[in-house]
Amino acid sequence: MAGTATPNAPETNRAGLQKKDYAGSKSTLCIGCGHDLITARVIDACFDLGIQPEQFVKLSGIGCSSKTPAYFMSRSFSFNSVHGRMPSIATGTALANRTLKMIGVSGDGDTANIGMGQFVHIMRRNLDLVYVVENNGVYGLTKGQFSATADKGSKLKHGAVNPFHAIDLCALAVELGCGFVARLFAGNTKMMRQVLQAALAFEGLALLDIISPCVTFNNHAGSTKSFPYMKDNELALQDIGFVPAYDPHYEEMDHGDEREIKLGDGSHITIKALDKDYDPTSRTAALNLLAEYHESGKIATGLIYVNEKEPRFVDQINMCDQPLSTLPQSITRPGKEVLEEVMNEQA
Ligand SMILES: Cc1ncc(C[n+]2csc(CCOP(=O)(O)OP(=O)(O)O)c2C)c(N)n1
Ligand code: SF4
Ligand SMILES: [Mg+2]
């Protein structure tokens, strides 16, 4: 937890770093873009947790959203990949160095259109990755065409109506076995900051589908991803808190009627039901909830599903403890004799 050493001195966190140590380059996005709000919360959450920037990797695809890793944590590793292919790069990174924590930033077009094939497969694995979809329902970078998350019947700026059903990324993620699924709104600062911390602490893959309005191409009447629509139709399911593992005060706190979820690293998510009390550890309840809200036109935000019992990707595939990237070539390239020995082994 962040603490202040001396009055008026800039706040430092447990890594001895200040907020400015988590900054990146200046944003080049349109003024008011929802994506910039998400960037600010990523910086907050990484600062709050005291993440060491040099132990962190930022990955993305292509789009306005995929440009945002340039705007935070310039001391971290970073790779801006091909359109829709961020999950492949994340998988390779996890294989090369299992000790790194990763954030992948994508857009609704990058994920639900060109990247759908990659998305569904990474949801089945449990990489240590926070997968953020900055969801504005359009291809912002290429001037605002509908993406596959645009709601049926919603309108483009010049009146065209979307005839197709929307893909619900949260429902797909729950269906495919993802262990941490949240739907958020870029305008809900508090919830984003808490859930981002929990997602970063989660040992496995966390999908955050964040409605992030495009103020230039999708913020008009008729859009269901605009700031005004979200202000009128967001239904925050929960008041979410996060207590990191290193905070010694958790046991002393009064948790009243809150639900608690203990994560594998010893941290806690606290959940106070606001709209309706449902169990985010139940897969069936999560899928029912998403279907029910979709019908109503309301956008339920909060923690949709948590299952922290699945083994991590690197353990599922029996990866050695030492990161591959630190092993000498004599081990990673054992040579012709060893290959021959393997080939001659009896099945
Ligand atoms: C292979 C390929 N096809 C198409 C494009 C053109 N293109 C660039 S960004 C983009 C869509 C981005 O939309 P989204 O992921 O929703 O990001 P946003 O800009 O809305 O944040 C497209 C189609 C491309 N760069 N590469
Ligand atoms: S075009 Fe839309 S998504 Fe892209 S930076 Fe501008 S407001 Fe953001
Ligand atoms: Mg988009």
Image (tube, rainbow, N blue to C red):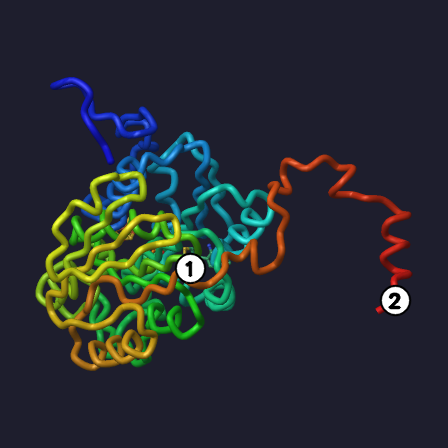
Residue under pointer 1: 110
Label 1 with label 2: CB-CB less than 8 Å: no
Q: Going by the image, does 306 lie left or right of 310? A: left
Q: Badge 1: few (under 14), some or many (20 or more) residues near its Cα, within 10 Å?
A: many
Specify the quadrant of the image occupied by residue 138: bottom left
Q: Quadrant of ligand 3?
A: bottom left
Give percent across and percent down for residue 256. 11, 58
Q: Position of residue 218 (x, y in %)?
A: 22, 61
261 and 56: which is toward the camera: 261
Residue at 61% x, 41% y: name it: 322
229, above or below 293, in the image: above
Residue in the image at 39% along x and 55% along y = 131
Residue 177 percent coordinates (x, y): 44, 69
Front residue (pair 58, 98)? 98
SS assignment at label 1: helix
Q: How many marks?
A: 2
Q: Residue at x 45, y 32 (%)?
A: 54
| Residue assigned mark 2 | 346
For the residue pair 337 and 215, the one nearer the viewer reads as 337
Asked if disc 1 is less than 8 Å from ligand 1, the answer is yes
Instruction: Kindly state the secondary structure of the residue where label 2 is placed.
Output: loop
Q: What kind of residue is marked 1?
A: Asp
Q: Can see residue 298?
A: yes
Q: Residues within 10 Å of mark 2 (few under 14, many from 20)?
A: few
Instruction: Identify which amino acid the numbered label 2 is placed on.
Output: Gln
User: For this view, does 81 lie left or right of residue 107?
Assistant: right
